Image (spheres, helix red, strand yellow):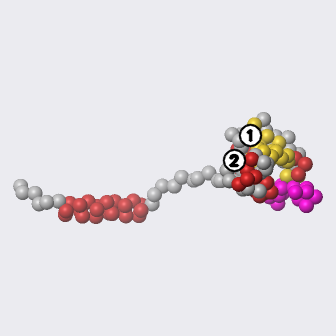
């Protein structure tokens, strides 16, 4: 796939990873493939050096390195795709996976939860429901002879 058609990977409106920062490796894939399974290099690995990327701001780089620390090896992110028979489809799958992974890692954290106390009405309703349930179960018991 010529890089002239794709200027880069668009992650968000403000971030596009240029093709020059991406590198590919291809190898033989396991799984289905018929006669060509042992000859075609259909497994695609997309490699991106996130730690040394020129398109990330220092804030974005810190957030990305922190959130993806378990997937990075020396600041390099590697995505492998081998679920399709065709190398081209595996390349597209790896690209899509990289975009989703980076976008999720750069998303700002959710606001912290503000703890709330149950209202008086909800407490009363809960206790009333428990009382009704207790009465129902007590009515099921056999009569006690005293």
Local SS, label 1: strand
Who is closer to the viewer here, 86 or 24?
Answer: 86
| Magenta span of residues | 1-15
Local SS, label 2: loop
Farthest front residue? 35
Q: Position of residue 79 (x, y in %)?
A: 75, 47
Q: Can residue 58 be seen in this view?
A: no
> Which disc number belongs to residue 11?
none
Who is closer to the viewer here, 45 or 16?
Answer: 45
Q: Is the magenta stretch mostly helix, strand or loop?
A: loop
Q: What is the crowding at mark 2: few (fewer than 14 residues within 10 Å), some, or many (at least 20)?
A: few
Who is closer to the viewer here, 125 or 8?
Answer: 8
Q: Residue at point 80% right, 46% down?
A: 26
Is residue 12 within the magenta segment?
yes
Is residue 97 within the magenta segment?
no
- Disc 2 designates what residue? 30
Q: Where is residue 38 in the image (x, y as percent from the top left)?
A: 74, 47
Q: Image quarter for residue 84?
A: bottom right
Q: Position of residue 51 (x, y in %)?
A: 82, 40
> Which disc number belongs to residue 72?
1
Q: Which of marks 2 and 1 is nearer the N terminus?
A: 2
Q: Where is residue 57 in the image (x, y as percent from the top left)?
A: 84, 47
Q: Is residue 66 above or below residue 113?
A: above
Q: Quadrant of the N terminus?
A: bottom right
Q: Residue at point 68% right, 53% down?
A: 32
Q: Can residue 13 be seen in this view?
A: yes
Q: What is the crowding at mark 1: few (fewer than 14 residues within 10 Å), some, or many (at least 20)?
A: some
């Amino acid at each position: 796939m010529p890089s002239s058609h794709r200027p880069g990977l668009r992650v968000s409106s403000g971030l596009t990873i240029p093709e020059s920062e991406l590198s590919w490796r291809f190898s033989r894939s396991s799984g289905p493939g018929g006669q060509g399974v042992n000859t075609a290099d259909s497994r695609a690995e997309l490699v991106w050096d996130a730690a040394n990327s020129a398109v990330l701001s220092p804030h974005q780089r810190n957030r990305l390195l922190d959130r993806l620390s378990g997937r990075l090896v020396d600041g390099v992110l590697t995505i492998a795709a081998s679920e399709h028979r065709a190398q081209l489809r595996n390349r597209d799958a790896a690209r899509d996976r990289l975009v989703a992974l980076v976008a999720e890692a750069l998303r700002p954290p959710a606001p912290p939860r503000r703890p709330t106390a149950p209202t008086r009405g909800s407490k009363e309703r809960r206790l009333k429901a428990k009382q009704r349930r207790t009465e129902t179960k007590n009515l099921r018991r056999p009569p006690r002879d005293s």
